[in-house]
Each structure stands twice: as C-alpha cells, then as structure tokens.
Amino acid sequence: MFDLSACFSYLHSGGPVMWPMLGCSVLMLWLAAGLLFRPAAYQPELKPTGVSWLDERRAQLSQQQWLQHQQEQLQSIRLLATTAPLLGLLGTVSGMITMFRALAQSGLHDGNAISDGIAMAMISTQTGLLIGAPGLLLAYLWQRRLGSQQQRIASGAHYAQ
C-alpha cells in the first residue's frame, strides 16, 4: 500500500530543494504520458479541398506544426532532465552547509544534527539523479522516434506504417 506520510517524510528529509524536484518529476511524467497516449507517427486529419496545390500546402503546414510541437516537447523533457540533477546538487550543498553549521554550533556532540545534514545531502542528490537519468533516456528515445518521423515526412510517407 502507498504510504503518503512516508513520501512527505522523504521530501522533508531531502530539504527544501525536493519540492522543485517533485515539480520537475511531475512535469516530466505528464510529458511522457502525453507521448505514450499520442499517435506514434504523424497522421494528417485534413479534408481534401479538391485543389491539389492547396491540399499539398496544407499538408506541409500541418506536418511542420506537428514537428514543431514535438521539438518543443522534446526540449521541455531535456530541460527538466538536466535541471533535476542540478537541483539535487544544490540540495547536496545545502545539506553539507547544514552539517557544517551543526558541527560549528555543537561540535561532535550532536550527532543527529550532523546526520540530518548528511541525509539531506544524499537524499537530494539521489532524487535528482533518479529524476534526471530516466528523463535523459526518454529524451534520447523521443529524439530517435522524431528523427525517423522527420525522415518519413521528408520522403513523402505521411501516414503511420
């Protein structure tokens, strides 16, 4: 069973940087879901007008719009996948600062404060990598799929095969 309090505890122990990383994760999942539930290839839904040059131009514009939208989605995935590990690194630095402050205030006598700082550093680093690595893989796979679609469109094969 899913324990929501354990999730909030994990987010809290990673420090304040965990909330932006959660946002990156949710946005990336939303984009990935859109990718999964979208047709795998460009599929024009244009009704012929009866004028061949007009139909051809409308098809070209539709293809360009589709490719532009796909490129924008891909750039969003790349941005999120790159940002998450950097946020994790920021959390690492914050956790180490917390640990050094605890050392300065209490010396080696307060092991809990020191371990909390180390935990914050490690949890935020781990979370950033857990979000970023699959995101980069998703961006790579999406780029390959988009490249093959661009080749199909360039060769005139406008429909999914």
Image (cartoon, rainbow, N blue to C red):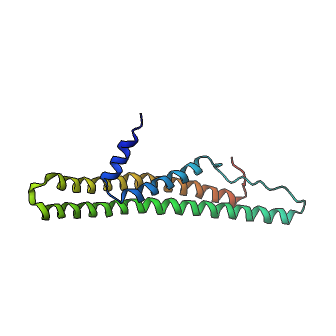
Residue 92 pos. (x, y %): 28, 60
At horizontal 89% and vertical 63% (from top left) the residue drawn is 51
Q: Nearer the viewer, residue 72 or 90?
A: 90
From the viewer's perspective, is 99 left or right of 127?
left
Residue 55 pos. (x, y %): 83, 62
Residue 41 pos. (x, y %): 66, 51
- Residue sticking out furthest to the right: 50
From the viewer's perspective, is 94 left or right of 28?
left
Question: Which part of the image, by quadrant, shows the N terminus?
Answer: top left
Q: Nearer the viewer, residue 32 or 63?
A: 32
Residue 21 pos. (x, y %): 41, 57
At horizontal 51% and vertical 51% (from top left) the residue drawn is 29
From the viewer's perspective, is 121 left or right of 159?
left
**Quarter of image, res 107:** bottom left
Q: Nearer the viewer, residue 50 or 128?
A: 128
At horizontal 42% and vertical 63% (from top left) the residue drawn is 83
At horizontal 54% and vertical 60% (from top left) the residue drawn is 74
Establish if 138 lies above or below 67.
above
- Residue sticking out furthest to the top: 1
**Quarter of image, res 6:** top left
Count of numbered circles on the image? 0
